[in-house]
Structure formats: C-alpha cells, structure tokens
Amino acid sequence: MNLSNKRKPSNDQVSELTTNRLSVYLRCLNQLESAGVDTISSQALAEQFHLNAAQIRKDLAYFGEFGVRGVGYYVKDLKRHLRHILGLDRKLRVAVMGAGNLGLALADYPGFRREGFEIVALFDIADAKIGDESRGGVPILDIKELKRLVRKEHVDIVVIAVPAESAQPVLDQVVAAGVRAVLNFSPGTLKVPPGVRLRNVDLTVSLESLSFYLAQGDVGPD
Amino acid sequence: MNLSNKRKPSNDQVSELTTNRLSVYLRCLNQLESAGVDTISSQALAEQFHLNAAQIRKDLAYFGEFGVRGVGYYVKDLKRHLRHILGLDRKLRVAVMGAGNLGLALADYPGFRREGFEIVALFDIADAKIGDESRGGVPILDIKELKRLVRKEHVDIVVIAVPAESAQPVLDQVVAAGVRAVLNFSPGTLKVPPGVRLRNVDLTVSLESLSFYLAQGDVGPD
DNA sequence: TTTTGTGAACTAGTTCACAGCT
DNA sequence: AGCTGTGAACTAGTTCACAAAA
C-alpha cells in the first residue's frame, strides 16, 4: 500500500496499451461494484471480462501495490486508485470543434458525462449554427471565441470533428489556445508540437480493417 | 511483380497494425494522385506523412512486390493493389444499428461513402423512428427486419451504435443474421463466435487516455 | 546510382511461473 | 491455503543495414 517509496513513473514511459486497459479495468470495477462485489482477484476479473490475470497484475503493479495477497483487490479501493491515476477524480472539461452531425452527436454522447467529463461548448464557423445549441443543450459558439472560452472555462480536452481539410488549421488554433490534449476524428495525419497529446480515432481505417478481413476470409479456408 | 509464386498469407497472420497502416498508405496515395504525383519512394512517402520507410516496404512486401528498384512505387498501380488487398475494389454494404445521435451521424458520415462504403439502412426499436430516415436519406427500419434486409441487400458490415446495455443482444441478432464483420461503438466487452470479426471503437477509453496524460503531465516535469 | 525487399538486430509487449506475503 | 507482485522467458513488432535489381 505504500505508494510513496515507489517511484512515480514519468508519464511517457507508460505504454498507451497499459493506460487503455486501466480504463477497461475501471469500467469492469464499476460493474462489479453495482453488482455488490467487494473484493475480486485478478484471476476472477480476467475470467469474467476475458482478460489476462498476469497482465492485470502487471498493469496495476506499475502504479502501486493495490492488492492484498491471499485476498485480491478491494473493488471500491482499486476503483478510487484507478480514477486517480486516470485523472478522473476531478471534473474534466471538454470542447468539441465542429457542430456537424458527428460533433453534435459527440457533444451529447452520454458515455462522456457518465464518466465525469463535462462538455462545455461546441465550436463552428457557420453563422447559421452559432448561437444555437445541441439537443442536449451544449451551446454552439463562434470559433473566434475559442481562446477566450478555453481560458474562462478551463477547457482540458478538445475533440475535433471537422471536415478533413480544416482539421490541421483548427488543430493549430486549438493548440494556440493552450489546449494540451486532443481527440481527433478527422482522417489523415495531423501534426502537434511536443507537449500536446493527440489521439486519433480513424473511422475509415476501422471500417477498412473489417473490409480487409472479409476480403481475405472470402479467399476461402480451403 | 509476380504475386503468384508468393504464398498468399492466410488472413489471421497479418497483424492488425499492418492492415491499419495499409489504409493509411492508401489515403496518402489518394492525396498524391490528386497532386499529380506519378511515382513515390518509400523514403519520400515516409517523410511526407511522418511514417517509417522500412515499415512501409515491409508492410507492402508482405503482399507482393509492388515496387520498382531504383524508382519507387507507381502511385496509381500501388493504389489499385491496396484497394484490392483491402477489399475495396467492390462496393461494401453497411448497416447501422441504433438511430440515436451517434448512429445517425455515422450513417451520414461522408468519409464512409468517399471510400466506397454504401450505408444501406439504420435499425432501431423505437416506433417513433421507424419509417423515418436520416438527413442523408438512409432509411430507418425495424430491427425485426434485420435478417431479411441483410440477405436481400447483402450487408457486409454492421456498425453498432446502441446503448451499452443492449449492445450484446443486438450483436447476437446481427451475428444470427449472418453478418461476419462488426464495428462496435458501445463501451464494454462484447463476445462474438469465431469467424466473426469484431472491432471496437471505445470513445470513453480514448478520452480517458488523454485524461491520464494530463494527470501525469500535471505532476510536473521537474 | 537509386531504391526495393529482406534477414538480422533490436525494442516493446505479453505470458509464465514462482517467491513471498497474508 | 490463496493471491499478489515480479523476474525470466517468450512473442510480436519495428528499425537497421545491405545485397540485389532496375
């Protein structure tokens, strides 16, 4: 349980694969907690959610000793630790660039709110949209207001859902406004300066990987 | 250039990382073609799009010898090969489960059509939505019609954009209807039988990985 | 000469297996 | 006994570096 005599790993040496799994573990724990489970072993967790027990232990052990030998992990306890590690113990503020279909859908996506993210605004350049709001009540602002709003509302993370051709210029504005974490839904390679984290969700690549599977599978398994 | 004396790799030994990159290469080639570029070396491709030249060559070499030594790759030619490998040389038919904000946005997502995917229908259980259509004109059908439509319209890929709690039952219906490739946007672990490919896009995990970065970064880089 | 295609070297990520704690 | 935390073994993925082809 002594976090203190364990060196806190400096952020970029933790693999993204590991941090992704931490999110997954947290979601599993939420379910277990709802189901009234108090403690769980890595073994049981792995079986229930199709994970690997050793990997769960390694991932967790990287951040501290959260388990109790002979017992397993206390669900509430581990949940609290994971929320802290993932930075979810404070409310994170998110803005969405682009009030098209996708931007509007993301702004109102219930999964974000449920995990404690707060969507503070949508941004667009179309006068027809500015001043309006999403169905869920997120206001649509002029992109010119971005810098001001980022400061005023302490925006932590920006989601980019603009057409491919404006993605890089919009990203540049986002970075200039002082945002250091960006989730991008536009296709193509974007460039960010060091110190800014860019994560891409590429819908086309995802669909094409399924297409590949079908194309190869159809060759026939003899 | 002789594909024939090279063993065609059976589908599951190609890493997903590789096939994802093939999609990326294809997109780069599209841009180059638009820009009027005829041939490109792996080196130039890597520099222009921030990739690794050796990796490009390895990825491509896995499927055949598409390059010409001393010259590079013919853009049109390689594009054609990649489209074939990725199964994009035939029109792929897609259905979307869930006519909520996200489902509607995905059904009308221009990137899908641009790459040759055809969105044939949305499915929902809400009577109020059934019979209606998306802004882009994709009809919303009763989920009871799924099996019939998959057969009639030869649906290749299904996108799942339903609430988390109905994701598994909906997926089961999709699989029962004979679909073998699924792109899932619901959070949580879903199970599919062997022979069905499931790809997950987990929006919460993506946002949380950014939160992690901010949380760790804020500890201060001394 | 230029640039591919590819074995070899390296790096990263996963899984095993067990010492040691409760 | 039961289960964690972790070095060691293994597997996968990337990058290097160069022989061979155009």
Image (cartoon, coloured by chain):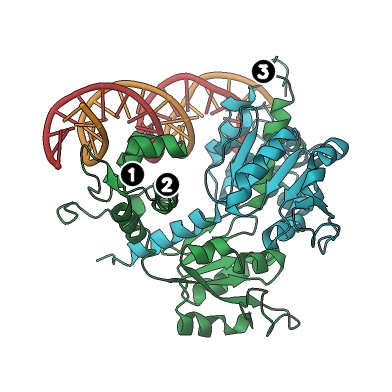
Chain colours: A cyan, B green, C orange, D red
Residue highlighted by disc 1: B59
Contact between marks 2 and 3 (CB within 8 A): the answer is no
Depth check, mark 1 against mark 3: the one in front is 1
Q: Quadrant of residue D17?
A: top left
Q: Is residue A118 visible to us here? A: yes
* Residue type at numbered disc 2: Arg
Taking the spot 46% from the left edge, 82% from the top edge, the residue there is B151
For the residue carrying disc 2, how many other residues have a C-alpha within 10 Å: few (<14), some (14-19), or many (20+)?
Answer: some
Name the image quarter holding residue A158.
top right
Q: Residues within 10 Å of mark 3 (few under 14, many from 20)?
A: few
| Residue A14 at x, y percent in the picture | 58, 29
Tag 2's secondary structure? helix
Q: Earlier in the sequence, mark 1 or mark 2?
A: 2
Numbered badge on residue A135? none
Residue linked to disc 2: B21
- Looking at the rendered structure, the secondary structure element under dot 1 is helix
Image-based side of B90 in relation to A107, left or right:
left
Q: Nearer the viewer, residue A164 or A44?
A: A164
Q: As shown in the figure, which amino acid type bears the numbered disc 3?
A: Lys
Q: What residue type is labelled 1?
A: Asp
Q: Name the residue under label 3.
A: A6
